[in-house]
Amino acid sequence: MRTHRPLAAAVAGLAIIGVAGLAGCSGSDANSDGPVQLEYWAWASNSQDVVDQWNKENPDIQVKYTDAGGGTDSSAKLLTANRAGNAPDVALVEYTTLPAMIVADVPADITEYVSDVEDAFTEGTWAQTTFGGVVYGIPQDVGPMANVYRADRFAELGVTPPKTWAEFRTAAEAIKAADPATVIATLPPAEFGFWAGVSTQAGAQWWSSEGDEWTVGIADEPSLEVADFFQALVEDGLVSTDPLLTPEYNAALNNGTMLSWPSAVWAPSVIENVAADTSGGWEMAPLPQWTEGDAAVPYQGGSALVVTTSSDHPEEAAKFAKWLNASEEGNDLMINTQSLYPAAIAGQEMTESNDPPALMPQQTDFYSVAAEISADTIPVTWGPNVNLARTVFADELQKAIDNGTPWRDAFIATQKAVIDDMVKSGFTVTND
Amino acid sequence: MTTATPRRAATAAASSKPRRARSNRLAPYLFTTPAIVLYIVFTVIPVAYAIWLSLRAYRVTGGALGRKQDVFVWFENYLAVLQDETFLAGFGRLLIYGVIAIPLTLGLALLFALLLDAPAVRAKRFSRTAIFIPYAVPGVVAALLWGFMYLPSTSPFSFLTKAAGLGPIPFLEESGIFGSLANIAIWGGVGFNMIIIYTSLRGIPADIYESARLDGANELQIAWRIKIPLVMPALVLTGFFSLIGTIQLYSEPATLRPMTSTISASWVPLMAIYRDAFGTDNLPQAAAASTLLAVGTVLVSALVLRLVNRRRNGVES
């Protein structure tokens, strides 16, 4: 048996956090002469190229970029670095974890520096970073929900791509009948963003706040009906719940037995990374609706830039963030070197003259479909403990799937855990 | 130099006898200083800090998006840990895993060590290295490597069973996961344990075997009656390492987690601690769980050692 010592490592890790806290150095260089030095944490691909461009144009404000690892890793690092007093000046934060960051005092109030770019974003997008009239971040990219599917395989099997979730079921049945080895999609419990999204689409509000009080709605009636609907799909063997992007899943994408991914407009580049050979077979459509004729969709994913409270140069940091997310040049770089779907209205309009993503070169209307989807989105409020909800939900739903118990119990258990945690942390919850 | 030194030393000794005596007293402490300093900086302080942290909590004041304050809560985190079903369920899984992994690792290590020690065996050095090499593979790499051999679409084993019309082997399903994880640990751990036992075997004086052979014992009898009892201390040591390794199980299930939905975020205690510390921003509760786990490990280890010692003393007397 191996004698590695994760426990010792964990304790040492806790200690390092403490030692770093004692050291208490600030992330930025505070010398008065010479250029201002900013530290920037993000994870989007090719961020370094974008930063290089800024550094070339702004000799007075030099930015040092660090790849902090995806959204979840990055938020954990940001929280600990902030407690230790050495957080970067500017950091990318997912909308889902922004409230948790605010509660931990990570993002600074940048209202005075950025109110001039408010009009560059739709109201719904700007609302994702504004709480109680205070602006905590500038939206970078958004993930309006969409369905990315194998148009060629759907046609081959004679199945119509679904516009509603009822049609999704019919399509899943038709696919199974035509080719039992093929499945319409996998909807794993770990995809918290998807489950929150489709519940929001059905009319639920998983978190909402009024005044000083929170209301949690993970076990709202609409969410429970969503649970029942998808439970039936899974029990009838029409969709899978295996995890995404495993070698297993990627193989299914490549051999054409996984036909769609209900997710968001950022999905094509993810699929392209693992199944480039299937390019040309895919198309993007709006997410299926619960009610026929509805058009509004919620968001899944997306992130904003925040200026941290430990920054010594909040004004310069905000300037850099504005250039990145709200300027024409920044948006151009975001679209063409980073393949992101920008949050700014002007950026989204710029995409329409772009070629479609490499996964669907034949879908020439890709970006107008994306803009159409993005124009009608459902505002969503995230709570201060989304990460807790995410892990509890994934574990509870998996348990329900394994044991064959009602899925709605998983939603109810998550709601209870979320409320308990909020009350314990000192929040007032109306449905406590 | 050689002629001058004794005289100079003698005069120095004569002129400053008390100082030299004092420096003699200090020297042993001086020699242990690096170890003590390192121990304090990297063990005592972190442990003390973790314990201090475990008595605190982040509490929000001031409205819907108030700010978290660091407050003192006494033993609240410890109570929360002891009531956390997902954390406690992890110990049940460790038990199942340990029951599979520990006896097999030790049994195989002992078997290989005895085989290598048998006089008639050829290519000893090669075999020893071959069995030891998996230990040099880092745990995460080993888990990834095996993970690909477990996944139905990439597994060579499942390829064979599928070809035979039996369907894939459920390596990563509820029914197979413990065996699959134990297999990774056994693959990686047998070599290390074998080396310890083998070294211990090499330390046994050869004349004992000689007299046993004169008394008519065959190799099997020698192994069973002489070698195994004499390497018992090595077996206790490796068993002890294995026990601690089992309680600290983390990297294998954490690495396999993205490949299967069978492994939850809190599948074993250390994963639950990681989740609290870095997933749900509850560092104090993670510190409390770490402290409990460390104390528990020490207690279990002490208990096991005591039982083993008592038994051995009983056998000897």
Image: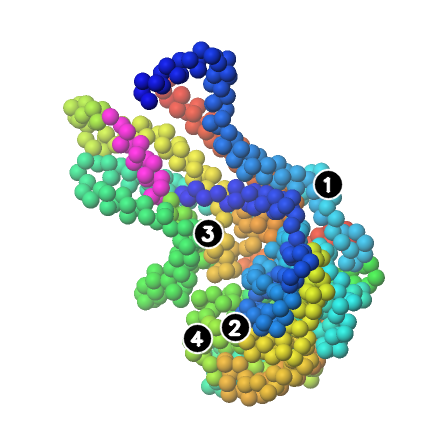
Q: Relative to the observer, which residue lies in front, B146 or B263?
A: B146
Q: Amino acid at mark 3?
A: Glu
| Stretch of the chain drawn in magenta | B190-205
Label 3, secondary structure: give it: helix
Q: Residue at x 48, y 51 (%)?
A: B251
Q: How far apart are the two marked residues, 1 and 3, measured between alpha carbons?
A: 34 Å
Label 4, secondary structure: give it: helix
Q: Is residue B204 magenta?
A: yes
Instruction: Name the spot of residue A10 as percent of width and height, x first.
Output: 55, 45
Query: Is residue B281 shown to the viewer in this render?
Result: no
| N-term mark: 1 or 3 | 1
Q: How far apart are the two marked residues, 3 and 4, measured between alpha carbons?
A: 28 Å
Please say if B10 is above or below A132. above
Residue on which disc 2 sits = A270
Magenta-drawn stretch, dominant element (helix, strand or loop): helix
Residue on which disc 3 sits = B252
Q: Amino acid at mark 2?
A: Val
Q: How far apart are the two marked residues, 1 and 4, measured between alpha carbons?
A: 53 Å
Do dots 1 and 4 share one subunit? no
Q: How far apart are the two marked residues, 2 and 4, measured between alpha carbons?
A: 13 Å
Residue A254's disc number: 4
Label 2, secondary structure: give it: helix
Q: Is residue B47 magenta?
A: no
Do dots 2 and 4 share one subunit? yes
